[in-house]
Amino acid sequence: MKILVTGVAGFIGSNLAQALLDKSHQVVGLDNMSQGNKFNMAGFDNHPDFSMHFEDVRDLAALIRTGEGCDVIVHLAAYKIPRYSDALDTLTINAAGSENVARAAVEHGCKVVAASTSDVYGKNPDIPFTEESNLVMGAPTVKRWAYAISKMFEEQLLFAYHERFGIDVVMLRFFGGYGPNQNLTWWGGPQSVFINSALDGEPLTVHGDGQQTRSFTYVSDHVNGIIASVEKPAANNLVFNLGQTREITIADLGRLIWRLVRGEDNEPKIDFIPYETFGKYEDVQRRLPDVNRARDILGVSPRVDIEEGLRKTILWQVARRREMGISTPDPVL
């Protein structure tokens, strides 16, 4: 198939592009490089079945142009949870990008596989989350919910386009992705920052009390789910959770990373940062998926446990830092 991937120079997009090319699909990449990284595309940017377009998902004409002849659009370009900025970019970029993808799909009669997020479950206390679980948001004065709300809008929008125009859509709720090509800042998640801190021998910065749990999912498990959603008609017009089913607290994640980088005999110093630092902010205590639907329909289940995945990720991050000219010690692992 010929597949347009938005956000192709980002974390999941670049891993997906390589995997699709390995399966002999053609890939059309679109990225404005606001968060993407040229290093992420080094393995495939000269591949004969890959073409790159430096465009913005807010540009409808660009999406229609690059989507011509495509069978599927995989929409990954997005802005994430606003911690250190206001929520406007998160809301407007995600809303406009999603609608432009939908309009381009109607224009070309192609399927849409779109990235949603586990964040849509919000403050729902009922664990594990199924795809039919309630989506419970906090107050509109708490900007932390902007990302989740933008993705809830995307889900509703794409299913509305399916109902009115007949395009097939698949929504994928990702849980805690990490691995090669992840962003090295908070944009990439706490594991990115913890690995940098451990390599540099600096205190780990943990938001809140660190007892909130997450399900961290190695990127290949996310990619396998995306490809199954692209290739399998049985996935059409459904929502799927894609994630690891093991929980770990953020504080324990930091300690595990520190041990893998610096050895058993070293205890990390942890700086606990109150949520008030970000203004009026809320977090959720647990985030755990039910993945039975993905197993039964997509035929995928998480394969990489967190210790194995972190070892691979740490080795990759060491190499990336050295590519960037950052002095980096060898990890213990």
Image (cartoon, rainbow, N blue to C red):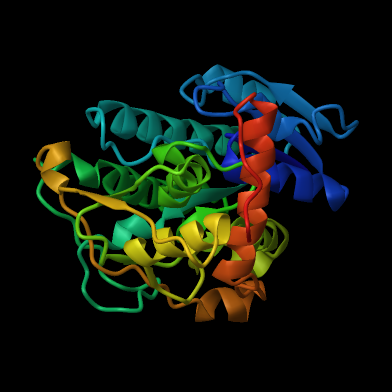
Count of numbered labels shown in the rendering: 0
Q: Residue furthest front?
A: 265
Residue name at image x 31 percent, y 57 percent: 120
Q: Is residue 48 above or below residue 19?
A: above
- In percent of width and height, residue 26 lies at 82, 40
- In percent of width and height, residue 121 lies at 29, 63
Residue name at image x 18 percent, y 56 percent: 137
Give 287 or 321, whichever is nearer the viewer. Answer: 321
- In percent of width and height, residue 35 lies at 51, 28
* Horizontal relation, residue 308 to residue 135: left or right: right
Can residue 148 be seen in this snapshot? Answer: yes
Residue name at image x 54 percent, y 55 percent: 262
Residue name at image x 23 percent, y 67 percent: 285
* Horizontal relation, residue 134 to residue 117: left or right: left
Give 222 or 285, whichever is nearer the viewer. Answer: 285
Can residue 72 be seen in this snapshot? Answer: no
Give 247 or 263, whichever is nearer the viewer. Answer: 263
Q: Which quarter of the figure has residue 214?
A: bottom left
Q: Is residue 221 above or below residue 78?
A: below
